[in-house]
């Protein structure tokens, strides 16, 4: 795709290629395109960026992700108009859409090939079970999960996770050394209410994560789980377990038990195994576990377990930061503050 | 939208989804944002499908929508992007349309040509590419595996991608830039 060029152009274009490669192969934040670059240089950069994306497509895990994402969209198109408008509103901002994604994933629900489910609806399968669970989790029903995190640094941390459909979440963390905090999403903003100090509110989850690491010195299981389950279809081999143990019976029902094992060689930060148990008639996830066999420094989570505690209706302010602090409690909104300032 | 036009949209969207994903992945660093903008593009396309001229190719129309969304988001939060401007997006769109000339019904079949190019790379380059993309090694981890400095690792990958670009171009045939 390179064009024929004279020696001077070649030097410039090599610089452009190096600039492109530097952007591709480093994790640093992007730099704006240098305004002094010629159009040819920019095209050279574009060629390298495209080749990078084509190599990801060719050599990374099976490219089923786009069809699963498209299935999500088509699923929404089949909803009543009011729901479609609601969804369209939600995707106006990528930041907000990211929050919505994280919610359904935090509930332990993964993107799968719903087309497969449609064509093979009468055949029990892991994919069908995942799809059923995913659809169920989108319903605006309050669900309370008890979460247990095994962490090498502080042994364990308990949390309570409350979810309502795919756009409300509240997580209460309680650990040793009087660590206690609420973390949540109200469908538009992420918020964090520590025991001491101002509540933090932002639409930018990355900035929230940075602040949490500074302030709370605690892991953020929700975000790690998001990344794990966001790729469950692409990066994991799914099976529907048939060896039912006693714990897989609830109210006389045999739970569906899905095992997901990470395909080898990919995504070192993701857990090696994900398992969940769901009610076969409703798809409600009753239990889910994430297990890492190799600990990565930044992750520092060995195992996370979710257990459904109840499905009682909660007050709406559970999902608002104002529901967890006094009216006079200080609130810091990060969105008006330049990045990097604490 | 009628059932038949929704069916048409679904057929076209499924056919062009892989290239849209590549288009977005080319300029966006953040994987979750790739997914977000993919869905946002599809929803927008569905909403304005009546404006699509059926005598024209669907792919560039779809990527035109995506390009506008990408630039809007880039202006708000450039940190999640690799490199991005109108010229870069235009060139990527143009190259993707050129890839249609390769044999194969789907993008993945067309990418069999890239696999051939990769197989013909010198071993040093091929190893670097496979470690980078198959094992997803980056930075110092990749440099350590290749026993190179970080700078030389980047140069090796850069040259490998350049050779692959040239190989694919030979398979497509001579094309001019936009």
Image: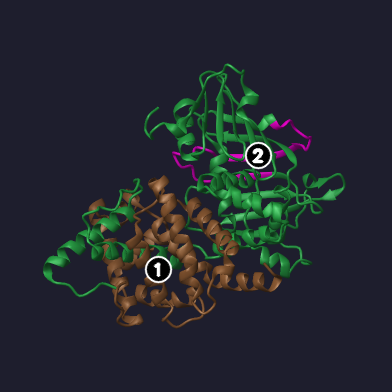
Query: In the rendered image, which quarter contains the C terminus of chain A?
Result: top left
The secondary structure type at the circle numbered 2 is strand
Where in the figure is residue B156, as x and y percent of width and height?
26, 61
Q: Residue A3's mark?
A: none
Which chain does tag 2 point to?
A
Q: The green chain is which one?
A: A
Question: From the viewer's perspective, is A342 left or right of A300?
Answer: left
The picture's colour for chain B is: brown
Q: Where does label 1 land, which residue?
A: B93
Q: Residue A168's mark?
A: 2
Of circles 2 and 1, which is in front?
A: 1
Where in the figure is residue A262, as x and y percent of width and height?
56, 55
Question: From the viewer's perspective, is B122 left or right of A290?
Answer: left
The secondary structure type at the circle numbered 1 is helix
Query: Residue shown at 32%/77% (left/top)?
Result: B169
The part of the image, by quadrant, that contains residue A2 is bottom left
A94 versus A182 height, above or below: below
Q: Is residue A314 magenta?
A: yes
Pick the front one: B108 or A142: A142
Query: Are there few (<14), some (14-19), or many (20+) residues within 10 Å of tag 1?
Result: many
**Residue A271 shows in this picture:** no
Give the extent of the magenta segment.
A288-316
Pick the front one: B153 or A99: A99
In the current view of this chain or complex, which residue is farthest to the front?
B51
């Amino acid at each position: 795709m390179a064009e024929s060029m004279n020696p001077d152009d070649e030097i410039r274009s090599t610089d452009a290629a190096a600039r492109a490669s530097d952007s591709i192969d480093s994790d640093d934040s992007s730099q704006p395109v240098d305004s002094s670059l010629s159009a040819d240089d920019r095209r050279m950069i574009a060629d390298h960026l495209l080749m990078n994306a084509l190599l990801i497509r060719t050599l990374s895990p099976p490219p089923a992700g786009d069809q699963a994402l498209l299935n999500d969209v088509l699923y929404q198109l089949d909803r009543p108009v009011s729901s479609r408008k609601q969804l369209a509103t939600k995707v106006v901002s990528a930041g907000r859409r990211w929050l919505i994604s994280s919610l359904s994933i935090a509930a332990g629900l993964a993107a799968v090939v719903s087309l497969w489910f449609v064509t093979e609806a009468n055949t029990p399968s892991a994919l069908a079970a995942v799809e059923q669970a995913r659809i169920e989790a989108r319903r605006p029903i309050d669900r309370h999960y008890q979460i247990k995190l095994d962490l090498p640094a502080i042994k364990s941390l308990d949390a309570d996770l409350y979810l309502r459909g795919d756009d409300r979440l509240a997580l209460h963390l309680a650990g040793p050394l009087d660590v206690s905090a609420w973390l949540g999403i109200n469908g538009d903003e992420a918020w964090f209410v520590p025991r001491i100090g101002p509540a933090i509110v932002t639409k930018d989850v990355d900035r929230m994560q940075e602040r949490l690491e500074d302030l709370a010195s605690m892991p953020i299981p929700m975000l790690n789980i998001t990344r794990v389950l966001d790729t469950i279809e692409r990066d994991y081999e799914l099976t529907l377990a048939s060896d039912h143990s006693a714990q897989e019976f609830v109210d006389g029902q045999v739970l569906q038990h899905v095992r997901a094992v990470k395909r080898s060689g990919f995504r070192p930060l993701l857990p090696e195994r994900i398992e969940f148990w769901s009610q076969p008639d409703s798809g409600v996830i009753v239990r889910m576990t994430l297990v890492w066999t190799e600990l990565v420094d930044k992750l520092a989570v060995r195992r996370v377990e979710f257990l459904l505690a109840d499905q009682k209706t909660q007050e709406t302010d559970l999902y608002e930061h104002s529901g967890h602090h006094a009216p006079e409690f200080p609130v810091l909104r990060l969105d008006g503050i330049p990045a990097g300032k604490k | 939208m009628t059932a038949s036009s929704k069916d048409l949209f679904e057929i076209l969207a499924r056919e062009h989804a892989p290239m849209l994903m590549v288009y977005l992945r080319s300029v966006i660093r953040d994987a979750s944002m790739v997914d977000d903008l993919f869905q946002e593009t599809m929803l927008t396309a569905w909403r304005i499908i009546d404006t699509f001229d059926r005598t024209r190719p669907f792919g560039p129309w779809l990527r035109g929508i995506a390009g506008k969304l990408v630039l809007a988001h880039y202006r708000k939060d450039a940190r999640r992007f690799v490199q991005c401007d109108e010229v870069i997006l235009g060139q990527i769109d143009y190259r993707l349309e050129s890839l249609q000339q390769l044999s194969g019904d789907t993008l993945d079949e067309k990418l069999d040509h890239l696999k051939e190019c990769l197989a013909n790379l010198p071993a040093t380059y091929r190893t670097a590419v496979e470690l980078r993309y198959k094992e997803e090694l980056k930075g110092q981890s990749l440099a350590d595996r290749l026993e190179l400095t970080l700078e030389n690792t980047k140069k090796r990958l850069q040259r490998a991608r350049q050779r692959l670009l040239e190989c694919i171009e030979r398979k497509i045939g001579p094309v001019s830039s936009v």
